Image (cartoon, grey):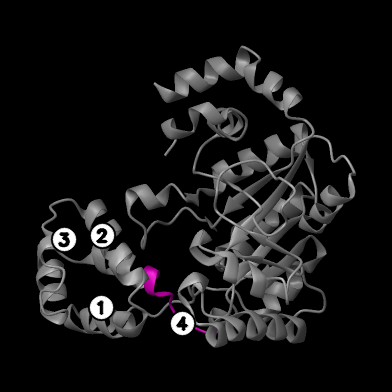
Amino acid sequence: MINKITFFLYYAGLVKLSRFINRNKVKILMYHRVDDKKIDILPYYANLNVSIKNFEEQMRYLSKNYNVIPLNDIININKNKKIKNSVIITFDDGYIDNYLYAYPILKKYNLPATIFLPTDFIENKKRYWLNKLYYLINKTNHIDLINEFNLLTNNKYKEQLKIQDRILLLEKLQDILKFDVKDREIIISNLLKKFNLKKKKKYFLSWKQINEMRDIISFGSHTHSHSILSTLNNNDLENELKKSKNILIKKIKSYTDVIAYPWGLFNNNVINNVKKYYKAGLTTIPGFVKKDLYKLKRIPAYNNGKYIFASYIELFFLRKLYK
């Protein structure tokens, strides 16, 4: 049904009309992964993993219909310079597929983009805890996983985990572990060991790959360890911001002095500290760019073809249909 609706909206001219009406509003698109493989991602989250075919369709569409500008041009917005019909392309997390699949397509269409790097994960085989959690849920019986999780946490979350659906289980475990920084790695490591899951795979970019992409891609901070900044004390918060910036300066000949908040979570204290080190901060709040450079909104890009993609980034009232 949604395909038919968006097909109609596109050819009825509503997408084009909306693009004209919003021609002076800059859109920042947020990507994560571009890959045809979905080994570590469940169906809902796979929607954030854009296929190579759909990504090329989306980039072709942007190249024909928008002025795709570098993220650094965002500074011009507060200098009253109109940037008409403009889009900015961003990626969070620095996955290796950004180099293998997204970069050649961006280069083909000569489209600038920015990748935000969690510096602690670059140039090694470290896995982010969420990747491990995806892998666990995909490779185990979810009832067995719940039982083991309850044993490891002394039944602390037993009532919350009376769940039959794997997607709901992922969401609940993600919510529990997101803020349990102290015990999270221990719990996940024990679960991987219990189910004999010892996958070793390079998930993230290398510095060589990063520097190779500098012809059309800039790089910003996604903190050092992808921590939720709003949960940190001031010393840890400053360390995350400062360490990430220092590594980027050392490893990349030129970088973008902008940060993307992990999980999109921030508060006034985070912003006050971010201002010491960066010129702007990107959120995960959907919407057009406004004047506050430390609360820049972004539009998440899902795994859709041309017509749905075009409708999605223009017609905000339809957003709930795409998730």
Mark nearer the viewer, 4 or 2 = 2
Q: CA distance from mark 2 to mark 3?
A: 8 Å
Residue closer to the observer: 216 or 189:
189
Q: Position of residue 51 (x, y in %)?
A: 51, 48
Q: Position of residue 129 (x, y in %)?
A: 38, 74
Q: CA distance from mark 2 to mark 1?
A: 21 Å
Q: CA distance from mark 1 to mark 4?
A: 15 Å
| SS assignment for the magenta stretch, majority | loop
Residue at the spot of label 2: 172
Q: CA distance from mark 4 to mark 2?
A: 24 Å
Q: Quadrant of residue 270?
A: bottom right
| N-term mark: 2 or 1 | 2
Residue ID at (46%, 24%): 3
Mark 3, other Cα within 10 Å: few <14 / some 14–19 / many ≥20: few
Q: Position of residue 165 (x, y in %)?
A: 18, 50
Asked whether disc 2 touches disc 1, contact meaning CB atoms under 8 Å apart, the reply is no
Mark 4, other Cα within 10 Å: few <14 / some 14–19 / many ≥20: some
Residue at the spot of label 1: 197
Mark nearer the viewer, 1 or 4 = 4
Residue ID at (14%, 67%): 146
Element at badge 4?
A: loop
Residue ID at (71%, 38%): 62
Element at badge 1?
A: loop
| N-term mark: 1 or 3 | 3
Q: Which residues are magenta?
A: 124-131
| N-term mark: 4 or 2 | 4
Asked whether disc 1 touches disc 3, contact meaning CB atoms under 8 Å apart, the reply is no
